[in-house]
Image (cartoon, rainbow, N blue to C red):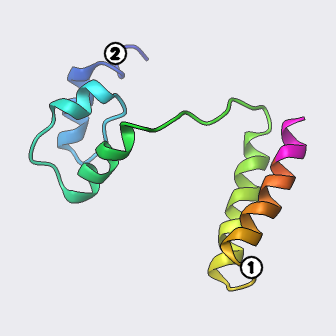
Amino acid sequence: MQFMMSDEVQKIMAKTGMIPVTQSAADSLTDVPAYVATYIEQLKTAQPRTPSASWGSIEQVLSLAIESVFRDEKTVTEALNDAATEIDALLK
């Protein structure tokens, strides 16, 4: 795992189109596609997800909430509020 997280390996993987997962590797990259540049910018403020044994259920709640917005079944606010209520229960 430590090897795969090294800057050297992350840079090699980036050359194949993968997105680097460490800030130091991301900072050293130049001439990257737009989608990678956007990701690198977001990496500066990214936070890891909350560790939880219920992550699979949480992910499903989030996916269904997003789908409900795309299907015009709920507004973004409604979907996120409903998801937050469900997720809060899963985290207890």
Q: Which residue is mark 1?
A: 74
**Quadrant of the frame with the N terminus:** top left
At x 73%, y 40%, the residue is 55
**Image coords of residue 14 (percent x, y):** 23, 40
Q: Amino acid at mark 1?
A: Lys
Main SS category, magenta section: helix
> Which label's residue is closer to the chain start, 1 or 2?
2
Helix, strand or loop at mark 1: loop
Gap between marks 1 and 2, in whole Å?
Answer: 45 Å
Q: Position of residue 40 (x, y in %)?
A: 30, 43
Question: Within the image, what quadrant is residue 48 found in?
Answer: top right
Q: Quadrant of the C terminus?
A: top right
**Residue positioned 65% across, 68% down in the render:** 66
85 sits to left or right of 12: right
Query: What number is the disc on residue 33?
Result: none
Magenta segment range? 88-92
Q: Compared with residue 48, is residue 69 higher up or lower down, i.e. above or below?
A: below
Q: Which residue is mark 2?
A: 3
Q: Is residue 34 magenta?
A: no
Q: Amino acid at mark 2?
A: Phe
Q: Nearer the viewer, residue 55 or 50?
A: 50
Label 2: how many Cα within 10 Å (few below 14, some 14–19, many 20+): few
Residue beneath the point at 75% across and 48% down: 58
Instruction: Please say if 72 is above or below 32.
Output: below
Q: Is residue 53 left or right of residue 67?
A: right
What x and y, as percent, mark residue 19? Answer: 31, 43
- Counting other residues with Cα less than 10 Å from the Cα at mark 1, is it few (<14), some (14-19), or many (20 or more)? some
Q: Nearer the viewer, mark 1 or mark 2?
A: 1
Q: Residue furthest left?
A: 31
Q: Quadrant of residue 42?
A: top left
